[in-house]
């Protein structure tokens, strides 16, 4: 049995929850499917101090507020893992690991990304208690303390320099020989000149030490094989992020080699009715506040798409009259003049046709569906089927001859 919804959101992090709030408030039947704890990566952040309206709040508490807000608007939640999707039809199909199937008019992909985990002892157990993956989120909590950074790429070095604004000292653990970093040359030079940064070369982390909080790290020199311990109160891993988009393989959704999904400023993907938000999309800033903005934008775009779809199906595809889909642009005088001419012609010649105007600026999915490249353009439909395309001539008699 397939359960039907207006909007399904895959993922319950800040972006997904924000989308749920806007979807529920718009009276859309909305479902959030989330495989883990509600809140995503934000749920692992012990304190958030840069979300508007909250001077200081824990990640879990903020995410509980998000979810409570969404439930207020009758949003449904399901804790399951999505394993496959079919976005090829108007009704998008989603299947979970437990075999449940759902359909929706629009889908928002908000599955986020996960830090690449080294799986060394202590890393998972002390996550959120000194083990961190985001300098912008957590650096200030290590004011005056000693911090270790793992990694030497652009993110590791640039984030490491950011951490020096707060920490007493930042020690970078680097796999390579002395002087060799994977980051760009400008960042490397700045890091070497930063008096609060030190480097341990040819080394890797063997273990994160501590019981309730990070107390130090065990370091192994990969050339000599010797191990040593370094006292610290925090450790940041910057060895890459992995978008949680593996289940979208073969869905037709455009995904970059890195696993991230390209989307425009409306969060629209290359597929009609599918939106990408938060940490799984290509974007500049990955923060709770930017994720929330993504979710709000996508939900509003999805609501308008669903409304247009319902209107089109009810008034166009099921209409007894022949439909003239008139594509126009209010900024192009030619298309406005043609619109006036066509309306006058139809009103003078009975009621065989009904005009349905399509503003290219707001109904791009219809333009794409009917392969419209420029305006004015007219597609003639009979019970939903395309029977002809008009030559949009300003010659009234020539235009009339195509219709009557």
Image (cartoon, helix red, strand yellow):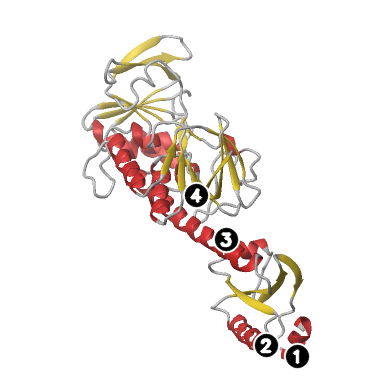
Q: Which residue in the structure is indicated by mark 2?
A: 345
Question: How many residues crowd mark 2 within 10 Å: few (<14), some (14–19), many (20+)?
Answer: some
Q: What element carries label 2?
A: helix
How far, Cα to Cα, is label 2 from label 3?
A: 28 Å
Q: How many marks?
A: 4
Instruction: Using residue 139 as the reference point, say whether residue 183 is left or right of it.
Output: right
How far, Cα to Cα, is label 4 from label 1?
A: 47 Å
Residue at x 68%, y 64% (from the top left corner): 370
Question: How many residues crowd mark 3 within 10 Å: few (<14), some (14–19), many (20+)?
Answer: some
Q: Choose the circle earlier in sequence order: 1 or 3.
A: 3
Q: Choose the circle earlier in sequence order: 1 or 2.
A: 2
How far, Cα to Cα, is label 1 from label 2?
A: 9 Å
How far, Cα to Cα, is label 3 from label 4?
A: 13 Å
Q: Is mark 4 on a helix, strand or loop?
A: strand
How far, Cα to Cα, is label 4 from label 2?
A: 40 Å
Q: Where is residue 21 in the image (x, y as percent from the top left)?
A: 38, 50
Q: Which residue in the structure is indicated by mark 1?
A: 397
Circle number at residue 7: 4
Residue at x 43%, y 51% (from the top left corner): 294
Q: Is mark 1 on a helix, strand or loop?
A: helix
* For discs 1 and 3, the disc positioned in front in the rendered view: 3
């Amino acid at each position: 049995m397939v359960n039907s919804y207006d909007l399904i959101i895959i993922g319950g992090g800040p972006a997904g929850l924000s989308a749920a709030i806007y979807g529920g408030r718009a009276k859309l039947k909305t479902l959030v499917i989330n495989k883990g704890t509600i809140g995503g990566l934000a749920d692992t952040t012990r304190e958030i101090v840069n979300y508007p309206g909250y001077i200081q709040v824990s990640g879990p508490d903020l995410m509980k507020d998000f979810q409570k807000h969404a439930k207020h608007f009758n949003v449904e939640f399901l804790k399951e893992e999505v394993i496959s999707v079919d976005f090829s039809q108007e009704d998008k199909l989603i299947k979970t690991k437990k075999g449940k199937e759902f359909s929706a008019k629009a889908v928002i992909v908000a599955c986020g990304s996960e830090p690449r985990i080294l799986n060394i002892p202590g890393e998972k157990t002390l996550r959120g208690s000194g083990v961190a993956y985001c300098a912008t989120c957590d650096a200030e909590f290590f004011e005056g303390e000693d911090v270790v950074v793992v990694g030497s790429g652009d993110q590791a070095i640039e984030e490491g320099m950011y951490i020096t604004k707060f920490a007493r000292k930042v020690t970078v653990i680097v796999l390579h020989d002395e002087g060799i970093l994977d980051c760009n040359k400008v960042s490397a030079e700045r890091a070497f000149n930063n008096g609060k940064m030190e480097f341990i070369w040819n080394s890797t982390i063997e273990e994160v030490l501590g019981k309730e909080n990070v107390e130090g790290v065990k370091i192994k020199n990969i050339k000599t094989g010797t191990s040593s311990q370094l006292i610290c109160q925090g450790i940041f891993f910057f060895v890459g992020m992995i978008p949680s988009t593996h289940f979208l393989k073969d869905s037709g959704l455009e995904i970059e080699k890195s696993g991230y999904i390209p989307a425009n400023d409306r969060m629209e993907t290359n597929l009609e009715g599918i939106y990408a938000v938060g940490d799984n999309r290509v974007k500049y800033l990955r923060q709770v506040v930017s994720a929330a903005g993504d979710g709000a934008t996508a939900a509003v775009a999805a609501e308008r798409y669903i409304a247009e779809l319902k209107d089109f199906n009810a008034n166009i595809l099921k209409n007894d009259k022949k439909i003239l889909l008139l594509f126009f642009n209010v900024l192009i005088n030619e298309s406005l003049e043609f619109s006036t001419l066509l309306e006058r012609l139809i009103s003078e010649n009975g009621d065989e046709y009904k005009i349905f105007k399509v503003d290219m600026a707001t109904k791009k999915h219809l333009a794409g569906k009917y392969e419209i490249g420029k305006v004015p353009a007219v597609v003639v439909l009979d019970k939903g089927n395309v029977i002809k395309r008009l030559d949009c001539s300003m010659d009234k008699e020539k235009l009339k001859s195509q219709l009557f």
